[in-house]
Each structure stands twice: as C-alpha cells, then as structure tokens.
Amino acid sequence: MSTLSNRINNLSESATIKMAKMGRELAAKGVDVISLSFGEPDFHTPEHIKEAAKKAMDQNFTYYTPVSGYPELRKAVVAKLKNENGLDYDFSQIVVSTGAKQAIANAVLCLVNPGEEVIIPTPYWVSYSEVVKLAEGVSVFIDAPVEQDFKITPAQLEAAITPKTKLFMFSSPCNPTGSVYSKDELEGLAKVFEKYPQVYILSDEIYEHINFVDKHESIAQFDYIKDRVIIINGWSKAFAMTGWRIGYTASNKEIANACDKMQGQITSGTCSITQRAGVAAYEGGLESVLEMRKQFKIRRDLVYGLLKDIDGIKVNLPEGAFYFFPDVTSFFGKSYNGKTINDADELAIFLLEEAHVATVGGDSFGDKKSIRISYAAAEDKLIEAMKRIKEALAKLV
C-alpha cells in the first residue's frame, strides 16, 4: 500500500520533462544527443533585461513582494495589454505568478469544483489535464485533427458543453501544434460562449509574439465574454526568460482576488529580482522579440521542408510557436532489430535511442498519432536532427 496520496499517485509525470531528462542521461554517457523536446528558446535573455536585474540587486530589491506582484510590474502588464492588444484592465486584475504554469494552476484550482467539466481541445499542452485532475474536475476532450489545422469548430464546442461545464482551456498560438486561431475563428467560439454564461474561458497566450501570420488575436477582445476570460501570459517565450519563472493572469477582480488568495498559501510573491527584470522587458520595446521571431520563422520554413522530404511523415505548416506536430501513424506496426513500434510514444523512444534525437510522443498531448518536434535550436542542429530522423525511420520495415 502506497504511503503517498491518491492525488500524487494519479498525477502523470510531465512528458516533456521526462524526455528531456532521458536525453540528458544519454548525453551524460557520451552520446551526441540533439534535444528537440523542450519548449525553450535557445536565445539568451536580452542584455537590457539582465542589466535591470543586476540593478535591482544593487538597489536592494531583495525583500518579500506583494503576492500579486509589484504594482509597477502589474501596471506595465496593463499598459502592454492596452497598447499591444487593445484590452482594458486595471492593475488590480493582474496577478503575477512564478511562471505561466502556476498562473494556470491558480486559475483552475480557483474555479473548478470536484465533478465539474473542463473542455480541452486536443492536442493540448501536457499540464492542462493534469491540473484539472488536481482540482478533481473532469476533462472533456474535443478532437481537432491535422485536417482542421488542429483547431476546433464552433459546432464541436457547442456539442461538448453540458450543464456541468465550468471551464474551457486552450492555447493560441498552440503548444504542441503551432496552430493560431484567427479573429474570425475566435469570434465563432465566442458566439457559442455567449449562450452559456456559466462557462469560463482560460486563454493561454504565452506564445503570443511567436506568430507568423498577423498580429496576435485574443478571445478577450469580445466584450460580451471578456469578464469570463482568464488570460494567461508571461515573459518566458517572447523574451527568452524561461529560467526567470514569471507569468501572469488577467481576469475579472473576483478571480484575481481568488488567485491572490491561492498563491498566498503556496508561494506568495514571485522573485523580486525577476519582477524588476519583467518591468524592463515590457518597457524596453519589442526589438529583440521581433528579431527572435524572424529567426524562428526561418527555422520553421527550414524544418518544414526537411520534414516534407521524409517518407511517411504527415505534417502541416504551423503558424506560430516553435513546434511541429507531425502524424507518424504510417510507422506503427513497423519494426527494427526485433522491436515493433506500436504508438507515437514508442516512436519517440526509438528516435532517441536510434537517431539520438529527443522529441516527445503525442499521448501526453492528447494525440496518440503524433510526435512533437521543437525547432528552438540552431539551424545546423536542426539540419543534422532531421537527417538523423530520416535515416532512423528508413530502418523501420
């Protein structure tokens, strides 16, 4: 009998972290592993942001912070939402957390009661359904296949809503698919939500600035549902600040106060130095962000061409983030050295062991047919990784 709680025993390990760990273990044995498993820009944090952190230490910003974050930072978030997204918030509606992941957990735990339903389009980011488990909610999945560019339709959404539905959660640009909802597509979903006032919408916009089609569109722009939208965002992807651990929610005041209360019992305010760096990031303009996006688009186009050249890979052209999510079902049932590939997770293990390229199987993203490939790596690494993948897959018969 386990001494651990059912809560932790029922929780799955993060697949992305697991694959990254396996890749590091293999590399520690002297193997040349190319890691395409983590959602982490390979760029450095811009200098003006690092300088702001150093200055903050010199100025003794080393004490506890307000649970929801420094007022200056929250006001910087408000200005960003107004200037970049055309959205009006008061700084009292912003709660800064130790990463967007904590912001998501705060919101779900504050909203969802045991037995209430949370609608999640698949594929989805690995932690969505696990946080719903922690809240003792029930995940309801909507399948969005590659033929739909991994995006659900209003009809699919409406068919999934029941009297028990409490929350809908999604990301755009999407992790793991890179799909981006247009304004018209978001409006179609918003019109459905308008008919169901008991349903809240968690909009994960952490990849906002890695968008190759147009300006970012937020579902919070539709006034008739804005009060029920919880925006999740942060600094990690746009400003290459993954290790700084800083994200936020923008929501109505009731939810913001609840998140403050929840966070006050778990972590309290996030790192004071990080918060000062966050102010500098938002006040320093988007020059570094736009340059990084330009490089990601070059990499996307490069990898797309290389993936299209691999027999058996079915892939679409993602419009944002830095991932491909190719369908690999043509390799299921094939074997090499006496081992048969039965699903995408096994194929990811095969690619790690045979090609020494770390990817992530799609099962944890709600799609057993695909693998996630991150192209947040240097071009020479991406070219070599695609070459290895192509050669390894050719061995399967």
Image (cartoon, helix red, strand yellow):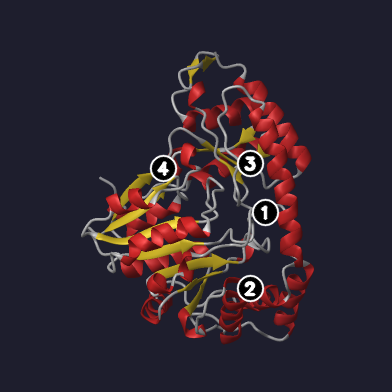
Residue 272 image-quadrant placement = bottom right
User: Visible in this render: residue 358?
Assistant: yes
Of the residues under marks 3 and 2, which one precedes in the sequence? 3
On the image, numbered disc 3 is attached to which residue?
36
Amino acid type for the residue under numbered disc 4: Gly
The quadrant of the image that shows the C terminus is top right
Task: State the residue position of label 1.
Answer: 41
Give the percent coordinates (x, y) of residue 44: 74, 59
Left or right? Give the position of 147 relative to 25. Answer: left
Residue 379 lies, with reference to residue 334, above or below; the image says below
Determine contact: label 4, label 1, CB under 8 Å. no
Residue 32 shows in the view:
no
Asked if marks 1 and 2 touch (Cβ < 8 Å), the reply is no
Whole-number angstrom distance, CA of label 4 to CA of label 2 = 33 Å
> At 74% from the left edge and 46% from the top edge, which residue is drawn?
298
Q: CA distance from mark 1 to mark 2?
A: 18 Å
- Residue for point 54% across, 63% down: 217
Q: Quadrant of the N terminus?
A: top left
Mark 3–mark 2 CB contact (< 8 Å): no
Q: CA distance from mark 4 to mark 1?
A: 24 Å
Along the polypeptide, which appears first: circle 3 or circle 1?
3
Residue 66, position as x, y percentages in the image: 51, 84
- Judge whether 166 appears above or below 32 on screen: below
60 up-or-down from 308: above or below = below
Q: Mark 1 packing: few (<14 Cα in 10 Å), some, or many (20+)? A: many
Comes first in the chain, label 1 or label 2: 1
Disc 4 target residue: 366
Q: Which residue is mark 2?
A: 274
